[in-house]
Image (spheres, grey):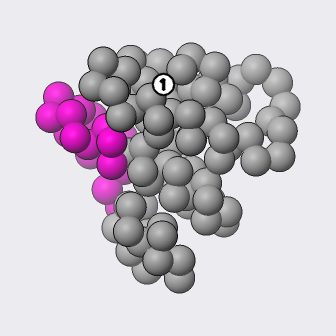
Amino acid sequence: WGGAARSLRGGGGARPPGGGAHAAGVLRNLTLVDAYQIKVVQDGALPALVGLLASADDEVAEQAATTLRNLSANPSLDVRLVMDGAVPPLVALLRSANPAVQEQ
């Protein structure tokens, strides 16, 4: 998960095409497991995920939104999600033309 978090934060060199969607997808899968949710946040992925919500690439925005949804299932992360600014861009996604993005 550290590599995916680094990729989202821009570390580790140039990103390959689709790298943001891939990294967010990896984190989406990891955050289905309660034990990894806090670790993903501790590794610094949250600000990058919030930033990806504004991506012009619907797949990237959907992966990021799904990952944040998974994290929101952990009550100990609620305040952190709000403090790191996840709510306004999530609300903005409700206006997306893509129903799959809206659903997340």
Q: Is 74 on the left-hand or right-hand side of 58? A: left
Image coordinates for residue 27, horizontal then vertical, percent: 50, 33
Q: Nearer the viewer, residue 38 or 44?
A: 38
Q: Could you tell me which quadrant the N terminus lies in?
A: top right
| Residue 83 picture quarter | top left
Q: Is residue 71 magenta?
A: yes
Image coordinates for residue 22, horizontal then vertical, percent: 66, 41
Please report the residue visible at 67 percent of the width from the left and 29 percent of the height from the top.
Answer: 7
Give neighbour class at mark 1: few <14, some 14-19, many 20+ (Cα, 10 Å): some
Q: Is 97 on the left-hand or right-hand side of 87? A: right
Please report the residue visible at 76 percent of the width from the left and 20 percent of the height from the top.
Answer: 12
| Residue 80 picture quarter | top left
Q: Is 20 on the left-hand or right-hand side of 71? A: right
Please report the residue visible at 26 percent of the width from the left and 43 percent of the height from the top.
Answer: 72
| Residue 20 picture quarter | top right
The residue type indicated by label 1 comes to Gly
The count of marks equals: 1
Look at the numbered disc 1 and give the secondary structure of its residue. Answer: loop
Q: Is residue 76 magenta?
A: yes
Q: Which residue is mark 1?
A: 44
Quick check: can you spot residue 29? yes
Q: Magenta residues?
A: 69-88
Image coordinates for residue 16, horizontal then vertical, percent: 83, 38
